[in-house]
């Protein structure tokens, strides 16, 4: 959470602002105190801020979710040892305490966020939009479920995040750093440099004669571990997810056309309009302002006279359903381009609405979106089958069937990989191709063993069951087996050593007064220039 605050504090100025925010909160907490995070309360608690207690179970859940998010980002799980080495455990604890502090301050100040505002933020989140660019309930459910949220928990969390942003935004809004500091930071961040450089490649290394058998053998002997055959594992797995099951579901044109007609508006591109709005204390002032505008005074000039921020007046290019106030939306989408509405009684007062550019909506044909509609229908049907297939798979596994046997019995298609190392590569050195992107079944298999009944992996809104079928231990390989690899590595080292020596010699001559262009020409290269570098 607090993504916006972390982003805001990514530079020096932001860190100063956020330090001020937390300082103000800490002063306010002096009234009721922050409990010591190491002592003073139950073993089930890690920290306590005011009335908010951070339990070990709560922290464990947040910490586990953070590791899973990092694992999805990196494409492989992050181990507990790696997380501790990077200090992720301490970062998560500090973040959790900071969030608890903001929650406690919101409670003390009596802040609240309405259900309507929370839902508006969720509806506008691009992560939850479907084919037509509108909010897709099924996509919403699948996405939050993938990240371990129930609907109610997600709504509650978004409401808390909104309140935290209100506090942070209010406190930091009036903070102005010294001009000297702003100037220094501006120079530091915006300073640009150019450079001249010379590239040396294999051509500048000269002729590399093949190594003698004795030299190659000695080179190999010193580096045997680099050419050791890794451990390989044979494994099988089956993916059960809405997308995978949807691939096996046939959708007729008749069914797809019915859904197309129902969702035609969602599948198309809705009309957009350039909308501006200006609120007034009463209808009389709004009508007077409209008379001035129709007489030649511009809408923006009237806003400036009233000391209004043009960024708040201008809603930009917007669809009708993106305008919060229905009365404003109806007025904006009933005007012609360039027109100004009569005074409109909206939720927040009396307003004048102006429309600028209009981008007409586009209604697609069935043929242009048939494939997308069929895929969406297949995925929706698959979601309904997920629980049924999952239960059947678990029943088969409980009865002693392995992954391949259980999959085939249920009509699913298992994948068997004959040999893969820890990095996901086959014995030929190439990445194994038939593992879905983002699925880290390989590292899971290397943490298991032959004959172990493994727990399924959560993946893409579904599950993956896997078995380790065999293990080929790591071994030393003789020189004859890897001779070509050893020769290639020996040659790379020889080239690298020669180029490093040549570069050192060039630097010494330049330091003694020679020009970079002269030295570059002497080795058959040229000076290149790069500009526009910033920190």
Image (tube, rainbow, N blue to C red):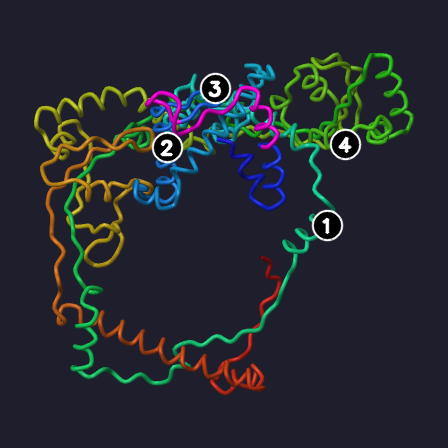
Question: Is 128 on the left-hand or right-hand side of 337?
Answer: left
Q: Position of residue 63 (x, y in %)?
A: 37, 32
Could you tell me which residue is drawn at 86 percent across and 16 percent down? 285
Which label was assigned to residue 310?
Answer: 4
Determine whether the residue tagged by mark 4 lies in a helix, strand or loop. helix
How far is mark 4 from mark 2, CA to CA? Answer: 43 Å
Residue range (magenta): 23-46
Could you tell me which residue is drawn at 18 percent across and 46 percent down? 417
Q: Which residue is mark 1?
A: 180
Q: Are marks 1 and 3 in contact (CB under 8 Å)?
A: no
Q: Earlier in the sequence, mark 1 or mark 3?
A: 3
Q: Are marks 4 and 3 in contact (CB under 8 Å)?
A: no
Q: Is residue 28 magenta?
A: yes
Q: Which residue is mark 3?
A: 155
Name the foreground residue: 286 vs 487: 487
Question: Is 204 on the left-hand or right-hand side of 345?
Answer: left
Q: Earlier in the sequence, mark 4 or mark 3?
A: 3
How far is mark 1 from mark 2, CA to CA? Answer: 40 Å
Q: Eyeballing the image, is 247 above or below 343?
A: below
Could you tell me which residue is drawn at 37 percent across and 28 percent down? 59
Q: Eyeballing the image, is 333 above or below 483?
A: above
Q: Nearer the viewer, mark 4 or mark 2?
A: 2
Q: Eyeballing the image, is 36 above or below 179?
A: above
Q: Position of residue 256 (x, y in %)?
A: 40, 24
Q: Earlier in the sequence, mark 4 or mark 1?
A: 1
Q: Are marks 4 and 1 in contact (CB under 8 Å)?
A: no
Q: Earlier in the sequence, mark 1 or mark 2?
A: 2
How far is mark 1 from mark 3, CA to CA? Answer: 43 Å
Q: Is residue 216 magenta?
A: no
Q: Nearer the viewer, mark 2 or mark 3?
A: 2
């Amino acid at each position: 959470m607090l993504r916006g605050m972390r982003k805001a504090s990514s530079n020096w100025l932001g860190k100063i602002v956020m330090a001020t925010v937390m300082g103000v909160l800490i002063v306010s907490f002096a009234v009721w105190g922050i409990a010591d995070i190491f002592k003073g309360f139950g073993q089930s608690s890690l920290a306590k801020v005011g009335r908010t207690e951070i339990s070990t179970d709560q922290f464990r859940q947040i910490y586990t979710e953070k590791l899973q998010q990092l694992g999805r980002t990196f494409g492989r799980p992050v181990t507990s040892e790696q997380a501790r080495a990077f200090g992720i455990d301490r970062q998560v604890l500090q973040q959790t305490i900071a969030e608890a502090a903001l929650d406690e301050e919101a409670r003390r100040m009596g802040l609240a966020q309405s259900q309507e505002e929370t839902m508006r933020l969720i509806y506008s989140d691009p992560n939850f939009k479907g084919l037509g660019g509108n909010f897709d309930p099924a996509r919403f459910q699948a996405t939050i479920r993938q990240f371990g949220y129930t609907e109610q928990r997600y709504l509650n969390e978004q409401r808390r995040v909104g309140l935290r942003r209100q506090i942070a935004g209010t406190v930091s809004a009036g903070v102005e750093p010294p001009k000297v500091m702003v100037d220094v930071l501006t120079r530091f961040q915006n300073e640009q440099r150019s450079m001249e450089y010379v590239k040396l490649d294999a051509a500048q290394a000269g002729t590399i004669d093949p190594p003698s058998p004795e030299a190659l053998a000695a080179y190999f002997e010193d580096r045997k571990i680099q050419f050791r055959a890794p451990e390989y594992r044979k494994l099988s797995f089956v993916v059960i997810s809405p997308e995978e099951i949807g691939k096996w579901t046939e959708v007729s044109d008749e069914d797809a056309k019915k859904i197309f007609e129902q969702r035609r508006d969602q599948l198309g591109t809705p009309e957009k309009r350039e909308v501006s709005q200006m609120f007034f204390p009463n209808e009389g002032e709004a009508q007077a302002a409209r008379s001035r505008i129709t007489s030649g005074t511009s809408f923006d000039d009237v806003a400036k006279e009233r000391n209004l921020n043009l960024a708040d007046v201008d809603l930009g290019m917007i669809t009708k359903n993106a305008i919060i106030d229905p009365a404003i939306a109806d007025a904006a989408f009933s005007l012609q381009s360039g027109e100004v509405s009569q005074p409109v009684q909206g939720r927040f007062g009396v307003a004048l609405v102006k429309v600028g550019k209009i981008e007409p909506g586009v209604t697609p044909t069935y043929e242009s979106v048939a494939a997308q509609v069929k895929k969406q229908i297949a995925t929706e049907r698959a979601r309904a089958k997920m629980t049924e297939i999952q239960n059947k798979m678990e029943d088969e596994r409980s009865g002693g069937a392995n992954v391949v046997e259980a999959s085939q019995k249920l009509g699913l298609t298992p994948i068997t990989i004959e040999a893969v190392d820890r990095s996901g590569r086959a014995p030929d050195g190439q990445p194994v191709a038939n593992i879905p992107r983002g699925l880290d079944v390989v590292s899971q298999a290397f943490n298991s063993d032959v004959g172990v009944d493994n727990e399924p992996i959560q993946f893409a809104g579904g599950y993956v069951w896997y078995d380790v079928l065999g293990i080929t231990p790591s071994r030393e390989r003789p020189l004859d087996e890897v001779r070509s690899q050893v020769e290639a590595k020996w040659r790379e080292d020889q080239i690298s050593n020669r180029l490093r020596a040549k570069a050192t010699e060039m630097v010494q001559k330049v330091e003694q007064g020679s020009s970079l262009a002269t030295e570059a020409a002497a080795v058959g290269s040229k000076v290149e220039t790069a500009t526009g570098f910033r920190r």
